[in-house]
Amino acid sequence: MKYFPACLSERESNAVAERINKLILKHGWGFWALHCINDDRFIGFTGLHQPSGALPFSPCIEIGWRLDRQYWGKGLATEAARCALQFAFGELALDQVVSFTAVANHRSQAVMQRLGMKRDAENFFHPDLPPGHPLSEHVLYRLDAAEFRPVSDSS
Ligand SMILES: CC(C)(COP(=O)(O)OP(=O)(O)OC[C@H]1O[C@@H](n2cnc3c(N)ncnc32)[C@H](O)[C@@H]1OP(=O)(O)O)[C@@H](O)C(=O)NCCC(=O)NCCS
């Protein structure tokens, strides 16, 4: 949670999970739970989300990820994200998926780059954070449907 404004309490984290669950029930898609295929442990989430706030590039569908630290460095976020993108450009027939993160969050940007997403020349300041907040400046990456390499072609 280093690149988010604050860590969540257990209660806040459960509330986030509840909101994610409700959105999945409403739309049929969302930030999906990830389970490790070896031990079936819950290891985080990856998936699609429609940001509710007014971002400079709204309306949009974003792709996002958050994994338990011990599961980093294994290619799992990128693998899961490719499946989510396949769903976005297949079942949902979206034209474009975006992703954004704080400028300092290089690990997340590396996932975006592995997916073939392209960075916008201009950064933006996240409207949910006060001006001058050290995390407010964000990079924006986009992937168009035509640029996406399906899972079967990517390994
Ligand atoms: C962002 C986040 C999901 C990235 O996780 P990650 O494990 O670094 O990303 P990937 O799944 O793409 O894994 C890539 C790494 O696995 C390695 N790897 C090992 N085996 C691999 C395999 N079989 N296939 C692909 N990559 C593999 C790659 O070499 C790379 O290693 P490196 O980081 O040393 O270069 C993770 O850091 C995280 O949860 N951060 C906190 C939450 C967060 O910031 N979310 C984004 C907010 S916008």
Image (tube, rainbow, N blue to C red):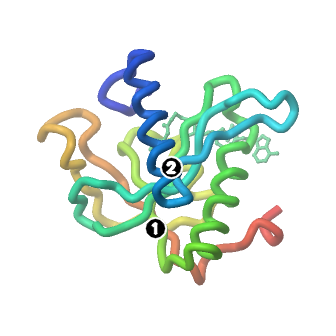
Q: Is mark 2 within 8 Å of ligand 1?
A: yes
Ligand 1 falls in which quarter? Answer: top right
Residue named by callout 1: 142
Residue at point 48% right, 34% down? 17
Q: Quadrant of the C terminus?
A: bottom right
Residue at point 46% right, 56% down? 26
Q: Which mark is residue 128?
A: none
Answer with mark 2 or mark 1, whichever residue precedes in sequence. Answer: 2
Q: Position of residue 144 (x, y in %)?
A: 52, 77
Q: Amino acid at mark 2?
A: Gly
Q: Amino acid at mark 1?
A: Arg
Direction from residue 73 to residue 137 in the image, left or right: left
Density class for disc 1 (Cα within 10 Å; few <14, some 14-19, many ≥20) is: some
Residue named by callout 2: 64
Residue at point 48% right, 67% down? 97
Residue at point 33% right, 23% down? 6
Asked where in the image residue 128 lies, by quadrant, the reply is: top left
